[in-house]
Amino acid sequence: MKHITLPLLLVLALAAGASKAEPDEELLGKAQAYPLGNASTWYSNPYRVGSWSAMDKVPGVKVRVVARPAEASPLPRAASPASISYRYKGMGYALTDFLEHQRTTGLLVLKNGEIVAEHYRYGRKDDARFLSFSMAKSVTSLLLGKALSLGLIASLDDPAEQYAKELAGTPYGATTIRQLLRMSSGLTFTELYDGKDDLSRLSRAAAGAAGAGKPIDVLKSITDRHSPPGEKFVYASSETDVLGRVLAGAAGKNMSELTTEWLWKPMGAEHDAFWRVGIDGQEQANGGFNAILRDWARLGQLLANDGRAIDKATGKPGATQVLPLDYLLDATDPARQPEAFKPRKATPYFGYGYQFWLMPFRERTFAMQGIHGQTLYVQPSTGIVMVMTSVWEKASGKQDVQPYEERDALWRGVLLTLGGSTVQ
């Protein structure tokens, strides 16, 4: 050390400090302690980090609580953290490199129900309730599967209007629940994330924006077709909105009550969650669920256990079947999908089940995904779960493919590091 000059020490100290900077942290509001936005600004920088981890505190946003049970299910930490590595574009990286490359607010990895990695960034802590965006679609699907198992929905081939009476006589009302689950209504709903599409119309209506009308009016206005119903997967958040209305109509309760009763309490959640609620009192089934990272991981573990709850005494999957197994397999198994919905057929890479993305691996592997990098990956046979929350700048891979490519590389690395399979 005696040969290192004071200026060089200063340079080294500055370099060390710079290495700890998180991607785009100033753009994302670090200097303002990651501020909350309001009902008009929460989606924009520099409000994303603060708002997307505490939507219930954003002025003008209405939510309903999903209550936790008196006791959470075990989520123990592994004896030693995993040394996770991955390869991307011919280079080898560690998990910490991914966190330095991408705008990740939370990341947690489970192996057989034990935490092997858990990270929070941009000043977030373990009590932050992260906005899921379209991961909520898969939660909606799980609730529908439960309603079906309880006989509240007679058949997935019933038309939506049988339960969502306000859609009677409309094209969405005539669409079957199964077709909606597969996003195959054949109705043309534009979802371009450009602020001018049908999704923006529906979102503004749900938020009660002046002149936007009611959400149900937007749904009724969708009448043009691109395909016959049931034949083709075309992503459309409107179809999950309809499913939320089907669910509430069939059960006679709101989605927050159903999530509490059917999922959050029997799963053994650690923290209350919440749904964002539209101006019409309907939960935003297509993107409004919020929960802490560990409870997203618990949900992933429940899916990895094929719907069985953790026995609190043993910490292992018990006999209580929280979610119906047959429905889960229909929702997440590529082998159970019609040809047009299988991996590399529904899209160039993913297949699509009942509101779940299906990966082209031999081992059943599936994902819940939301815009801007929200993800929950599950490979049941190997007990591996990875959940990630993010504030990526662009909404989708069509706008900026790089974060999505590196996320896929990381997931493959997690699988290979922890004994999973990526064989196709």
Image (cartoon, grey):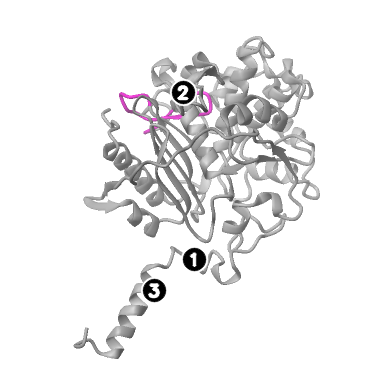
Q: CA distance from mark 3 to mark 2?
A: 44 Å
Residue at 61 percent across and 13 percent down: it is 149
Mark 3 vs mark 2: give the one in front: 2
Q: Which of the two residues, 240 or 126, is positioned nearer the viewer here?
A: 126
Q: Is residue 18 magenta?
A: no
Q: Amino acid at mark 1?
A: Glu
Name the front one of labels 3 and 1: 3
Figure disc tally: 3
Q: Which residue is mark 1?
A: 25
The residue that mark 3 highlights is 17
Span shown in magenta: 349-364
Residue 76 vertical placement versus 83 (above, below): above
Vertical comparison of 69 with 305: above or below: below
Point out the tag, 3 or 2, that comes first from the N-terminus: 3
Relative placement, left or right, of 296 versus 79 is right
The residue at the far left in this view is: 3
Q: Quadrant of the N terminus?
A: bottom left
Side (left or right) of 218 relative to 321: right
Of pointers 3 and 1, the one earlier in the residue sequence: 3
Q: Nearer the viewer, mark 2 or mark 1?
A: 2
In the image, what residue occupies the spot 57% across and 23% down? 181
Quarter of the image where one finds residue 124: bottom right
